Every structure is written in structure tokens, then in C-alpha cells.
Image (cartoon, rainbow, N blue to C red):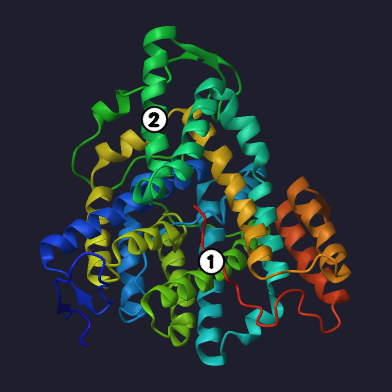
């Protein structure tokens, strides 16, 4: 088929719509809108916790989704939302004194590395990656990335409003598990709305709260919900202004090898995410998408690098949108083009961005305490789905030290100006120690396939 020509179909309820087909445009817009809602919560929560601009992230998620579809020649229906894989590295960069330009510079290089991996996979096949990064290793890296973030919740978000955080976390857990179908898929968005309402209610009932706001050093009296920025924002305009650290919202990246090493482990997580995503889509559509695996990985790398070049957030393929496809059985790439355009338009609405940026700290505390734990447990999910044997000392002992170093934020000082810390050091030890003691054991299933989709 030509790139922008889909066969128009209108099947009965429950009958599938293939990637190269589309419903009539009215229904296609409706499905596209569902994809926007599904990716919404996580796509603008993660920029907030990384200290980047949510409006810019939403806009680039739309641009990058369209680029992904073009690079994969409309064969892999997917939405590219904000990646959580770099959150731990970003926290480490800021802890070591880096600013937003250092953050986006490091992530840009990571994106280019992922692009190079995609090119390698496209021409050499995926066997090489599975040999270097078997499920035992990939699961450990994803786990330490997630659990390394526990202090961020404990020290920054939760103390801003512990009761709102607890109520928001409780609501999110219940919504994600107990609500039916599509509603469970948008639990993050629903939790944001719930947290906002609870914060507004608490302001009215209990008055101001005394706590330390994120980035501040002393406790102050303040409203949980402040709409001053929302009232001042324009309805239409390009993302602009400054971030909390004084860097412009749209900015050029800066580069530091120390900071780059802190985010490179995120590339391993993205390889696992994209591989699992493509396999999941192939299983749903019945298509053989292995020839497009390298394109998908490379497209995500290119998208991450492009967004970072302008100060945007890193991207990844979203399992939330697999959920929408599972519920609707509509796999049409046309719906994803619609979703991309809608996201770009939202990114051009500063008032929307101001609402996002006004999210109370207690709400973020409740959401991130669940999300960060889920990132870590995706690592366990990789182990379980690939039947990694922890009776085998290669897995038990080979991974142990790296996990503790990554989760505990252990530092190895190499020179006065250079050290390896936490996620970066933990990832290196996981890979080196595993292969040091591995004598032909695959540490998992014989296929070594990364059967994982994001649980966010």
C-alpha cells in the first residue's frame, strides 16, 4: 500500500481492523482520541518528575509517533509516549549538580546509541542483542532502574502532602486493577484528576499546608492547588518560558561524559521495551514483524534524540496503547496519526501545560510511589516470563552485586572528577559479573527473547 492510503472498512463489533485498514474517518478520530487519553497520564507525569516541560513532551510525543510510523512504513501500530527508563539517571544527574541542558544532552546521546542498536539489529538480526543482554541481565537492569528511585518519592514528593499522596496511591492501585477494560488503562490520568480534586477539597476544608515544596529547602505555608499560572497562560502558543532550574523550556543540550554514563543503562530498558512491544503487536495482529524490529528500535532512538535536541523528553513505545488495541481490536495506523496530530495541538496550548505544571506535589507522590515500583517489578516480570532459573548460581550470584549497587546508589570514585554511581555502576556490574561467570548457560530460556511489555 502507499504510505497514506488505507483500505476503508467498517466491520461489525469485535472484528479486527488491520494496520493497513481504517474505519471511516469519524470512527478513526474516535479511536485516535482514545489513544491520546491512554498515553496521557504517564506522558506528562514523567517530564514533571524529570524537571522537563510537559507541554513540550506532549507535542514531541505526537511528532515522534508520526516519525515512528513513517520509519516502520506503517507496519507497527504504536504510540511513542514519554519514557520512564531515564528517570533514575536524570535524578542522579540533578543530584550531582547537572541542569536540564545536561539532562537532555545525556539523553540525546543515549537516543543515538539506541538508534545505532536499531541499525545493527536491522542488518544483523536480534540474536546478538539477546546474547549480550539475555533476560536475566535485562530484568536486573530494569529492576535496579526502578527501585533506585525510591528515595525520590521518600525525600521529595511524599513529604509535600503525605495524606494526599496516600489517598492518590490507594485510588491509583484500585483503579488500575478493579476498573473495567479501558478505564484501568488510564489509571494514571484518573489518579491525577482524583488527586487534584482531593487537594482542592483539602484546601477548602483544612486550609493551607506547611511543607517543603520540591526544590525548596525550608517549609512554607502554601495552597496545595495554585491556579495563578493557569490564569496567566495563553490558550495558543509555542512551548516557552523557563524550567524550575532556570533553563529555557526549549533549549540546546550540553554534554558531559559523567552524565551520559548515568543514563546509558536506560538504553537497555528501551531495547527490552521495544522488543517486547513489537512482539506483542505481532501476536495481536498476526503479522510477522521481526523484519521491522530494528526499524522500531532505531525509530525510538531517533525520536528520543530529536526530542532531546530541543529540550523535550525521551520516548518509548507505550503498552497503554496496546491496551486500547486489545479492547477495540482496531490496529489501524491511521488512528495513531490522528492521535499524533491531537497531541501536537495539545502541545501548542500553554494553558493546558500550566494545568499540568500545577499538579500538587502530594499527587505526584502518590502516583510515583506506584509507578516507580512498577518500573522495578517489570524487571521481575522479564525474569518470570522468560523462566530465569535462580537455582543457577550464574543468575543468583552474577546479578546480586549489581542489583545492590544500583538500588543502594553505591559510588565508585575513579578520579577526583569522575565517578560511577548507582544505576550506571550497577548496570556495568550486572553485565560484567554475569558474563564473567557464564559458561554457556543462557541464564533463562533458550530463545532469550525479551517477552516484556511496559506495565505502565
Q: Nearer the viewer, residue 152 or 447?
A: 447
Q: Which residue is labeled 2 in the image?
A: 194
Q: Is residue 314 above or below residue 237?
A: below
Q: Measured from the top left, where is residue 48 in percent x and y? A: 46, 41
Extreme residue toward the bottom, this view: 123
Q: Measured from the top left, where is residue 232 in percent x and y? A: 25, 28
**Which is more foreground, mark 2 or mark 1?**
2
On the rendered image, what quadrant is the N terminus found in? Answer: bottom left
Q: Which residue is labeled 1 in the image?
A: 273
Q: Measured from the top left, where is residue 355 in percent x and y? A: 32, 34
Q: Is residue 170 above or below residue 161?
A: below
What residue is shown at x 22% (from left), y 62% (from top)?
338
Image quarter of residue 379: bottom right
Q: How packed is label 2: few (under 14 Cα within 10 Å), some, or many (20 or more)?
A: some
What residue is shown at x 37% (from left), y 60% (from top)?
321
Q: Is residue 92 visible?
A: yes
Q: Is residue 66 above or below residue 39?
A: below
SS label for mark 1: helix
Q: Is residue 416 visible?
A: no
SS label for mark 2: helix
Label whose residue precedes the other's in the sequence (2 or 1): 2
What residue is shown at x 70% (from left), y 69% (from top)?
387
Q: Measured from the top left, where is residue 341 in percent x and y? A: 22, 60
Q: Nearer the viewer, residue 356 or 339?
A: 339
- The reply to whether discs 2 and 1 touch (Cβ–Cβ < 8 Å) is no
Q: CA distance from mark 2 to mark 1?
A: 29 Å
Amino acid at each position: 500500500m502507499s504510505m497514506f492510503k488505507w483500505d476503508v472498512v467498517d466491520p461489525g463489533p469485535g472484528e479486527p481492523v488491520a494496520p493497513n485498514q481504517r474505519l471511516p474517518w469519524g470512527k478513526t478520530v474516535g479511536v485516535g482520541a482514545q489513544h491520546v487519553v491512554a498515553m496521557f497520564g504517564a506522558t506528562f507525569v514523567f517530564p514533571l518528575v524529570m524537571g522537563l516541560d510537559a507541554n513540550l513532551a506532549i507535542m514531541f510525543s505526537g511528532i515522534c509517533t508520526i516519525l515512528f510510523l513513517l520509519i516502520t512504513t506503517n507496519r507497527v501500530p504504536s504510540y511513542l509516549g514519554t519514557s520512564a527508563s531515564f528517570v533514575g539517571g536524570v535524578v542522579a544527574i540533578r543530584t550531582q549538580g547537572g541542569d536540564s541542558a545536561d539532562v537532555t544532552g545525556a539523553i540525546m546521546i543515549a537516543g543515538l546509541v539506541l538508534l545505532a542498536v536499531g541499525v545493527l539489529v536491522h542488518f544483523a538480526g536480534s540474536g546478538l542483542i539477546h546474547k549480550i543482554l539475555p533476560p536475566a541481565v535485562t530484568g536486573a537492569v530494569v529492576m535496579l532502574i526502578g527501585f533506585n528511585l525510591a528515595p525520590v518519592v521518600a525525600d521529595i514528593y511524599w513529604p509535600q502532602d503525605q495524606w494526599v499522596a496516600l489517598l492518590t496511591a490507594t485510588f491509583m492501585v484500585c483503579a488500575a486493577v478493579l476498573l473495567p477494560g479501558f478505564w484501568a488503562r488510564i489509571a494514571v490520568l484518573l489518579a491525577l484528576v482524583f488527586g487534584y480534586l482531593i487537594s482542592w477539597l483539602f484546601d477548602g476544608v483544612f486550609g493551607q499546608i506547611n511543607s517543603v515544596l520540591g526544590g525548596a529547602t525550608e517549609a512554607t505555608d502554601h495552597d496545595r492547588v495554585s491556579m495563578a499560572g493557569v490564569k496567566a497562560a495563553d490558550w495558543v502558543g509555542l512551548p516557552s518560558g523557563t524550567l524550575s532550574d532556570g533553563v529555557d523550556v526549549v533549549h540546546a543540550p550540553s554534554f558531559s561524559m559523567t552524565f551520559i554514563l548515568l543514563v546509558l543503562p536506560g538504553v537497555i530498558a528501551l531495547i527490552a521495551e521495544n522488543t517486547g512491544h513489537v512482539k506483542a503487536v505481532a501476536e495481536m495482529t498476526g503479522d510477522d514483524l521481526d523484519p521491522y524490529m530494528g526499524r522500531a528500535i532505531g525509530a525510538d532512538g531517533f525520536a528520543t534524540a530529536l526530542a532531546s535536541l530541543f529540550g523535550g523528553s525521551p520516548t518509548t513505545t507505550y503498552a497503554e496503547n496496546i491496551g486500547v488495541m486489545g479492547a477495540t481490536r482496531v490496529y489501524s495506523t491511521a488512528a495513531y496519526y490522528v492521535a499524533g496530530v491531537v497531541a501536537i495541538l495539545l502541545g501548542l496550548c500553554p494553558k493546558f501545560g500550566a494545568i499540568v505544571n500545577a499538579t500538587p506535589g502530594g499527587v505526584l507522590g502518590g502516583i510515583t510511589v506506584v509507578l516507580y515500583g512498577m518500573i522495578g517489578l517489570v524487571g521481575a516480570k522479564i525474569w518470570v516470563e522468560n523462566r530465569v532459573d535462580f537455582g543457577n548460581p550464574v543468575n543468583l550470584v552474577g546479578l546480586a552485586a549489581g542489583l545492590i549497587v544500583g538500588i543502594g546508589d553505591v559510588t565508585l570514585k575513579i578520579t577526583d572528577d569522575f565517578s560511577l554511581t548507582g544505576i550506571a555502576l550497577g548496570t556495568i556490574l550486572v553485565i560484567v559479573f554475569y558474563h564473567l561467570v557464564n559458561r554457556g548457560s543462557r541464564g533463562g530460556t533458550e530463545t532469550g527473547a525479551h517477552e516484556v511489555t511496559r506495565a505502565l
